Image (tube, rainbow, N blue to C red):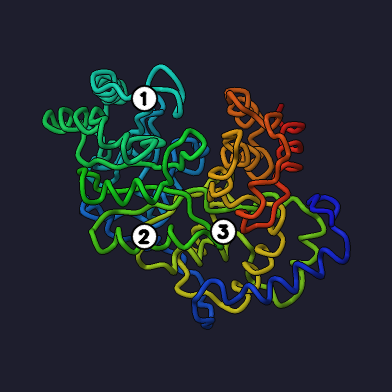
């Protein structure tokens, strides 16, 4: 069966609809009457033991500058990757506000290599943040976030450099809270994100966490969110919109979405509502390219309930994604004898097909030591894929797209 999003057959569309109905129960949430989206502020939630009250929708330094004033007005007060701003590029609206009224996050990467080959270096991380604070003229960063995270529990045990850099900076008043954005690392013999986060919760002073989470994700991710809530650790979901972007550009999918039963919802809005319905999740960072996306996301986040049309739209998307869109769970990587970073490759595909960031996707793909051509077609990964993706064929397809 063809899974080309530009070439869906009538049978494919019928399958999506049928699958969608069956998938409605996956969310585990009651179907309640939808309420009109509030036109004012985003809901706020406590960001774990940081004590920060942050707007449910997280802003990002790569948002178009025209969006920032609207975002501030809507209640966005936490800014992801704010280290990208300097004194000249810091949004003017933020300069007019009291510094304590918004929160800036500084993302810190490994040095001398990418997130798989680079190393943790206390002094370089310390100097990096100190320099960024000075160049941005913001006084301090509210959150020091270790980007991509540890490779394994053992790596977290043996490499205290990030924590030590944070502690030095905190002592000088340059940062306030410690967080981590954790990826999966089975492709290099490491651990899954939730395994690492479970260890950190009891053994390292991380106040908050960020991780992949989307509709239909593995139960271990939801279990981590519940554990984090009990331990008062903040949680931000990322890579939440699997398939939403490509579906939006698929004329046949959009024709199916025009059915009256989906009226008043879209897969993107329904995904936001579904995420927001999880009271144990603090917030979500969602790629936002224009005002229409922003308006949809804020409106959905401000709404108090999912309606039948939202469940139907999510179910339609779930059926569309089956066999097509990777949820980035990385389970397949644990079975690959060639140690290919399959989920990383499919993440880059998402940058291209969902976000339309082709240059970024090709750059990231080009940096891989083992790309889609490394696949020998053994099929060992296939039984692990909950999405029933023909992984070998898809790796070839992504290589043609990005290679």
> For numbered disc 2, what is the local secondary structure?
helix
Q: Residue at x 25, y 31 (%)?
A: 158
Q: Is residue 321 visible?
A: yes
Tell me if 236 is positioned left or right of 376 in this view.
left
Q: Is residue 95 visible?
A: no
Image quadrant in which the N terminus is located: bottom right
From the top left corner, tell me how far across and down residue 303 is, in percent. Answer: 47, 70
Dot 1: within a 10 Å radius of its alpha carbon, few (fewer than 14), some, or many (20 or more) residues? some
Would you say the residues marked 3 and 2 are in contact, meaning their CB atoms lie under 8 Å apart? no
Rounded to the nearest whole Å, what is the CA distance between mark 3 and mark 2?
25 Å
What residue would you read off at disc 2?
225
Tell me if 27 is positioned left or right of 283 in this view.
right
What residue would you read off at disc 1?
86
Pointer 1 or 3: first along the chain: 1
What residue would you read off at disc 3?
296
From the top left corner, tell me how far across and down residue 170 is, in percent. Answer: 16, 33
């Amino acid at each position: 069966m063809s899974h080309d999003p530009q070439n869906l057959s009538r049978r494919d569309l019928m399958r999506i609809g049928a699958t969608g109905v069956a998938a409605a129960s996956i969310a585990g949430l009651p179907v309640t009457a939808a309420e009109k989206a509030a036109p004012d502020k985003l809901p706020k939630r406590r960001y774990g033991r940081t004590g920060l009250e942050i707007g449910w929708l997280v802003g990002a330094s790569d948002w178009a500058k025209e969006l920032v004033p609207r975002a501030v007005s809507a209640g966005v007060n936490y800014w992801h990757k704010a280290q990208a701003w300097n004194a000249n590029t810091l949004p003017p609206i933020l300069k007019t506000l009291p510094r304590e009224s918004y929160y800036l996050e500084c993302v810190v990467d490994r040095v001398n290599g990418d997130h798989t080959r680079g190393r943790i270096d206390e002094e370089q991380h310390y100097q990096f943040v100190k320099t960024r604070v000075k160049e941005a003229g913001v006084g301090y960063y509210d959150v020091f976030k270790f980007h991509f995270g540890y490779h394994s529990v053992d790596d977290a045990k043996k490499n205290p450099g990030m924590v030590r850099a944070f502690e030095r900076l905190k002592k000088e008043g340059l940062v306030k809270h410690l967080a981590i954005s954790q990826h999966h690392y089975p492709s290099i013999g490491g651990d899954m994100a939730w395994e690492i986060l479970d260890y950190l919760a009891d053994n390292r002073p991380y106040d908050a966490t960020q991780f992949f989470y989307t509709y239909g994700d593995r139960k271990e991710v939801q279990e981590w969110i519940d554990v984090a809530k009990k331990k008062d650790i903040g949680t931000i979901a990322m890579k939440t919109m699997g398939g939403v972007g490509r579906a939006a550009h698929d004329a046949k999918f959009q024709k199916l979405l025009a059915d009256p039963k989906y009226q008043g919802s879209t897969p993107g809005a329904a995904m936001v509502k579904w995420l927001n319905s999880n009271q144990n999740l603090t917030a979500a960072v969602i790629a936002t390219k224009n005002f229409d996306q922003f308006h949809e996301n804020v409106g959905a986040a401000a709404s108090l309930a999912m309606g039948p049309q939202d469940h139907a739209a999510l179910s339609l998307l779930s059926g569309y994604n089956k066999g097509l869109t990777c949820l980035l769970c990385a389970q397949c990587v644990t079975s690959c004898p060639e140690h290919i970073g399959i989920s990383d490759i499919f993440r880059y595909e998402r940058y291209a097909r969902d976000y339309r960031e082709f240059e970024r996707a090709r750059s990231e793909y080009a940096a891989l030591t083992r790309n889609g051509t490394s696949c020998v077609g053994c099929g060992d990964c296939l039984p692990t894929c909950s999405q029933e993706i023909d992984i070998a064929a898809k790796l070839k397809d992504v290589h043609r797209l990005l290679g």
